[in-house]
Amino acid sequence: MLKRIVLAVLLLAVTCSAGSWAAAPSTLWPPKIHMEAGVGFPQTDEFKYGWKAGLGCGGGIETGITKHVILGLDLDYNHHGLNGAHLLDDIKARLPEDVTVSETIVSGGSISVLTAMATVRLDLTTSSSITPYLRIGAGLGRVTVAKANWSLVLADTHRRILASNVTPFDHEDALATSIGAGVRQQPRGSKVGFTLEAGWVRIATENGSTQMVPVRLGFVLGF
């Protein structure tokens, strides 16, 4: 599904480029920088242990090759804490039905996602100060896990069960891909603009992909 979406966006970008290249000279210089901050919502697979929604920030540099097609280099960081209640519910669900837990403790636990990607942005219109756009990206992602400590006390035997990990790795580097859509508000002639974007990010970690939905508010600054 993702491959089809990426191919469709690339095809649309090529079509727009062909139509606007002759009408508008290359805008390779000067570039623009952008910075964003917002929240990220964990999704499936590597996040199945119950990570909370977290905070994220990012930035990058971009330059246009036509009126509609913009190339960029982006760096993005997200941090999520562990949902201890969700983890303990999952653990207790795996215990025998006749086992009762009298005490539970969870401490620590977080996951950080750092991505560096090359991106292509397609501006759907350039005729007004408000521009809707699509963005795709690919690059490298690093997922880093800070281990959580948890314990259970069994009511019948008062036996304490201890553990200190919730994922099979401490950190992992893998292919990262993303797709997003947003709007940019920038009056004509102004060097400052503002963006609102929502997207989907996938890190192809070995034991199951790490996926999240980031929502970002940011600004663009031209030189």
Image: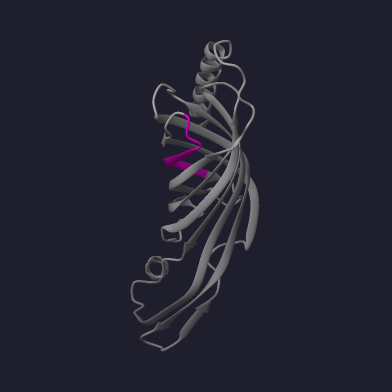
- Where 162 falls versus 5 (above or below)? below
Residue at screen point 46% across, 61% down: 49
* Main SS of residues in magenta: strand
- Find out whether residue 196 is within the magenta segment: yes
- Where 58 falls versus 179 (above or below)? below
Q: How is the image coloured?
A: one colour
- Where 13 falls versus 96 (above or below)? above
In this view, the residue in front, 4 or 26, is 26
- Where 130 falls versus 86 (above or below)? above
Residue 90 lies, in percent from the top left, at 40, 65
Residue 58 lies, in percent from the top left, at 54, 49
Residue 28 lies, in percent from the top left, at 64, 27
Residue at screen point 54% across, 11% down: 23
Count of picture labels: 0
In this view, the residue in front, 45 or 20, is 20
- Find out whether residue 15 is within the magenta segment: no
Q: Is residue 213 left or right of residue 67?
A: left
Residue at screen point 46% across, 42% down: 200
In this view, the residue in front, 122 or 52, is 122
The answer to whether residue 167 shows anywhere in this view is yes
Residue at screen point 43% across, 41% down: 194
Q: Is residue 125 left or right of residue 21?
A: left
What's the magenta region? 189-201
Outermost residue toward the front?
Answer: 189
The answer to whether residue 1 shows anywhere in this view is no
Q: Is residue 66 left or right of residue 182?
A: right
Residue 146 falls in image quadrant? bottom right
In this view, the residue in front, 194 or 192, is 192
